[in-house]
Image (cartoon, grey):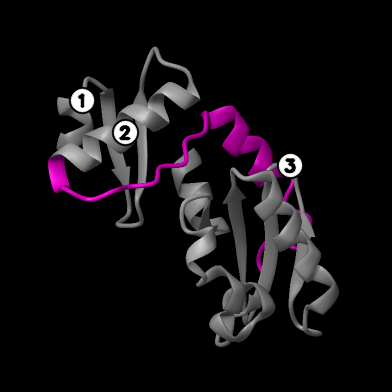
Amino acid sequence: AKAFEDAGFTNVKTILASGNVLLDSRSGVDGVRKKAEKALRDAFGYDAWVLAYDLDTVRSISERFPFEREVDGFHSYVTFVTDADVLDELADLAKDAGADEKIERGEGVIYWQVPNKGTLDTTIGKTMGKKRYKSSTTTRNLRTIEKVLR
């Protein structure tokens, strides 16, 4: 939070320990992303990839979750994607999904729901670990998104 405050952002609030930050800025979303990446690079000395969204966009993404939100034994996720080619690749994984894995493309996101004990063994889980996706994707549990929106 301090790195963002030092960069000039106001009303900075971190949510959980999951890399989610709420803040106010007069810059547009792209400006926030660039400024946040520089702030993290300057404060911590590493290349950070930031995905930034306004709250109305996050709210809309959450509201459009296409599956039942809470299912016993399953996790509900949203993968935010900024690269159109990556979004296409991830959406194409739906055809290879296992019986218990649901994958659906949204606007700039991939919605998915998987058994809670096998997330890393799913089609999406195995794919998301690839370096190619690191700079243009981030995945959040739907419950985390709801906490951001409160």
Q: Residues within 10 Å of mark 3 (few under 14, many from 20)?
A: few
The amino acid type of the residue labelled 1 equals Ala
Q: Secondary structure at mark 3?
A: loop
Q: Residue under label 1, please give it.
A: 7
The amino acid type of the residue labelled 3 equals Glu
Q: Secondary structure at mark 2?
A: helix
Q: Residue under label 2, please give it.
A: 36
> Which of pointers 3 and 2 lies earlier in the amino acid sequence?
2
The amino acid type of the residue labelled 2 equals Ala
Rendered view: 99 above or below 79: below
- Quick check: marks 3 and 1 in contact, CB under 8 Å? no
Main secondary-structure element of the magenta-colored stretch: loop
- Quick check: marks 1 and 2 in contact, CB under 8 Å? yes
Q: Quadrant of residue 117?
A: bottom right
Which stretch appears magenta? Answer: 43-70
Q: Is residue 66 magenta?
A: yes
Q: Secondary structure at mark 1?
A: loop
> Which of pointers 3 and 1 lies earlier in the amino acid sequence?
1
Q: Residue under label 3, please give it.
A: 107
Which residue is more in the foreground, 86 or 108?
Answer: 86
